[in-house]
Structures are given as structure tokens and as C-alpha cells.
Image: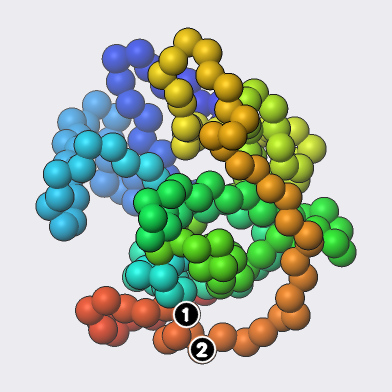
Amino acid sequence: TGRILIPQDGYVLGVDAGDTDLITKFVKVGARLWLHLDLWPDLEITSAVGGGPRLVKDGQVFVPFAWEWFSLRHVQERAPRTAVGITAGNKVLLVTVDGRGGRLNTGMTLREMAELMVQLGARDAMNLDGGSSATMVVGGRVVNDPSDGFERPIASALLVVHRADAVNLAGQMTTARTRPLNPPARNWDLDDLDPDPQNTPRSYPSQ
């Protein structure tokens, strides 16, 4: 979301501010780099969207944040959230929760977001980019309240597009605003919150 110019015939190698030493140590100007992308497991995937961590699996809260390299702070903080889910009847759920708007608009933790997706009927669900990027647009109109007060420039988005030249969305798409949710703060058992599919020993990121 920054203002980095990407060469038309090249790429930009971006790293976090704390990892610049890795670049200066191992990468020199003029060096040749190889990029290898692989999927695990090796599935025949034709389309993909970035996000995480997972929120719901088989109708149950499932937030393996450390397994998927997300920090504990990201899980516990209340913030605007965006998620996508699919029901047992193969209906797609696109959900945005506003936050950072005062006492009645605090956002959700990822555990709370997972519980909301279960309440909405999700069989499986995944967290998407939230925070200031949490924006939902229906029919060309913003239907939530972005925390910055405007739509943030983003690099990617999940779109639902009808292929016809014109379509009447009324009756085909349902949007609903729910009342503010402000559950009391709770302490969660980390092993319950972060199930590990392979029971691998791990440490939790502090940031």
C-alpha cells in the first residue's frame, strides 16, 4: 500500500524494517535471484486469495495463528475485521466488522470473529485483511464505515462479479447491518485457540 514504483519488466523485493540486515548481508546490487513458489499440500488450485489465519473448520472455531505465522497480538487486539466463509449449503459469506470508532464500535478479536462466522453458519472460514483496509462495497457503494473515514488504497481485493452487462442485485444479494457487539474481554486457553494439525512444538510470537 506504499508508494514504491515497480518496474514494468521487474519486481520489487520488499522486507519488514527489522529484516533489512538480511538483505544487505546476502543480496548485493546486480545479484541474480531465483524465486520458487510451491504449494503445500500440492493441490490443483486455479484461483487463490491471500489471508489468514483460518477461523472456522468443519463448523468449529479453529484459529491456528502461530502455525500460520501470525502474532498473538494480531489475534488478541480488537480491530476492524474482514472474513470470507462458506456454509454447508455452499453459500459464500463475506463479512466486514467495523472498529476503532469509540465505545460502541470497537471491532473484534479473531476469536470473536471466528465465533461470529460460526453463528452465521460458516462451515469453513478465513480471516482477510482488516484494520484500515476493512471495506465492503456493494453495487459501487461503500456499505460499512472504514476506520480511516475513507477507502484505503489496497493491493488486492476479493470481488464478486456478475458476467452479464447489467444485473439487478436485489433479491440475489443480501446485506445486513448487525447491532454493535461488545463482549467482555476474556482469557483464552492458547492451545484451544491455536490448534496444531500436527501437534508440532512451537513458540508464540511476542509481536
**Other residues around mark 1 within 10 Å, as few (<14) / some (14–19) / many (≥20):** some
Which residue of the protein is positioned furthest toward the front in this rendering? 171
Answer above or below: position of 26 versus 165.
Answer: below
- Residue 36, disc: none
Query: Which residue is located at x 73 percent, y 56 percent?
Result: 178
Q: Nearer the viewer, residue 84 or 199?
A: 84
Question: What is the secondary structure assignment of the residue under circle 1?
Answer: helix
Give the answer, above or below, for where 59 lies relative to 132: below
Is residue 190 placed above or below 1 in the rendered structure?
Answer: below
Q: CA distance from mark 1 to mark 2?
A: 6 Å
Query: Percent from the top left, x then y, of residue 10?
Result: 30, 20
Q: Which residue is mark 2?
A: 189
User: From where the camera sits, is residue 158 visible?
Assistant: yes
What residue sits 36% from the left and 35% below the top?
13
At 22% across and 79% down in the image, what residue appears?
Answer: 198
Quadrant of res 29: top left
Indicate the quadrant containing the N terminus: top left, top right, bottom left or bottom right. top right
Residue 136, x across and y down, in percent: 63, 38
Which label number is shown at residue 193?
Answer: 1
User: The disc labelled 1 sits on which kind of residue?
Assistant: Leu
Q: Which image quadrant is residue 45 in?
A: top left
Comparing 194 with 15, the one in front is 194
Measuring from the top left, give residue 71's x and y in whole percent. Answer: 49, 67
Labels 1 & 2 near each other (Cβ < 8 A): yes
Q: Amino acid at mark 2?
A: Asp
Residue 72 located left or right of residue 44: right
